[in-house]
Amino acid sequence: MYSTGNKKVFKNAVTVILVRPSASAGWKLFLVRRHQKQSFMAGAYVFPGGQVEESDKSPELESYIKKTPDFKPASILQEDDLPEEEALGFFIAVIRETFEEVGILLGGSPSGDFISFHDKDVRAQYNEYRRRLYASEITLSEIAREEGILFFPEVLVPYAHWITPDFEKMRFDTRFFLAKLPPEQRPVADATELTDSLWVTPENALQMHRRKEIMLMPPTFKTIEELSVFASIDELFMACAQKEIYPILPQLSGDFILLPHDPEYSLAGYKKSPDVNIASRIVNENGVWKTAYYR
């Protein structure tokens, strides 16, 4: 069976890699478990995220965004041909989805201080906003106007761009972002689409995956493997500021999933210069994903 590279992509989506320092282990990332009844990646541990909605591109949001003159969403995404309003929509979608799914709000005062949920009354108020936002009873703009806050898209650092291959029934065009956990906020999974969550080092996440304690799908697994080389959050963000981002459309070829740098990868428009020194293949062995090199 071979992936054809059909470019039809049904839905734009985003995902956020939340990270925080750890006194005992350098740093950790946040994973959530998808409900077993979900139609896509049921039971898998993933980064929080979801589909981009039309409301994420609303011109009304412009009044509630804190940004510098240098903030050019399309350029930051390394997609200069993307209309700016569409590019900004990916950043806003991350902010909305992160709040809806895990209760983390990447926003705060006009001076740039993140909102604190330390006070129980504030926390209760924003939990209600979260519920109403998920139920489409309120918009991000309305929350910002009511509370006098702004959203902070510039705290998001693009990390990767994965496209669901055409051998999957549901396809998404997903931008991955990095974000540091705001102080005095704590993520809590929504208990609707998500059933569990954990803070874990990349190394421990990979070990749990190998022991079949958690299930990771190829994009999540490959991302965590890449992140495992960084000793600190500062090192991670410095490296990612220089990272080349390009669309990764996996190609199924026999028993392997090929990635764009593999010498045998052949999808026009996605193929990159062959590089035998990087892990360019993903293979499933006894129900566990692992990377492999071209031989």
Image (cartoon, rainbow, N blue to C red):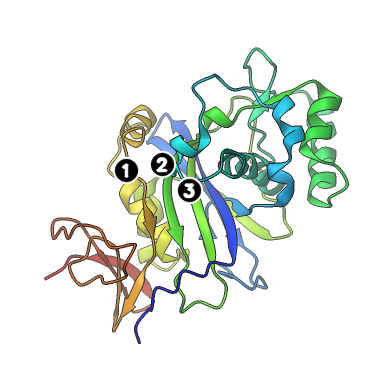
Quick check: 187 left or right of 241? Answer: right
Badge 2 is on which residue? 78
Instruction: From the viewer's side, name the closer residue of 230 and 118.
Output: 230
Badge 1 is on which residue? 244
- Disc 3 to disc 2: CB gap under 8 Å: no
Question: In this view, which residue lies farthest toward the left?
Answer: 295
For numbered disc 1, what is the local secondary structure? loop
- What is the spatial separation of the Cα atoms under label 3 and label 1, in whole angstroms? 13 Å
Labelled disc at residue 176: 3
In the image, which is nearer the foreground, mark 2 or mark 1?
A: 2
Tell me where residue 41 appears, x and y as whole percent.
Answer: 55, 69
- What is the spatial separation of the Cα atoms under label 3 and label 2, in whole angstroms? 13 Å
First in sequence: mark 3 vs mark 2: 2
Question: In this view, which residue lies farthest toward the bottom?
Answer: 1
Query: How many residues crowd around disc 2 within 10 Å: few (fewer than 14), some, or many (20 or more)?
Result: some
For numbered disc 2, what is the local secondary structure? loop
Q: Residue at x 42, y 60 (%)?
A: 219
Residue type (three-letter) at the residue carrying disc 1: Glu
Residue type (three-letter) at the residue carrying disc 3: Phe
Instruction: From the viewer's side, name the closer residue of 166 and 39.
Output: 166
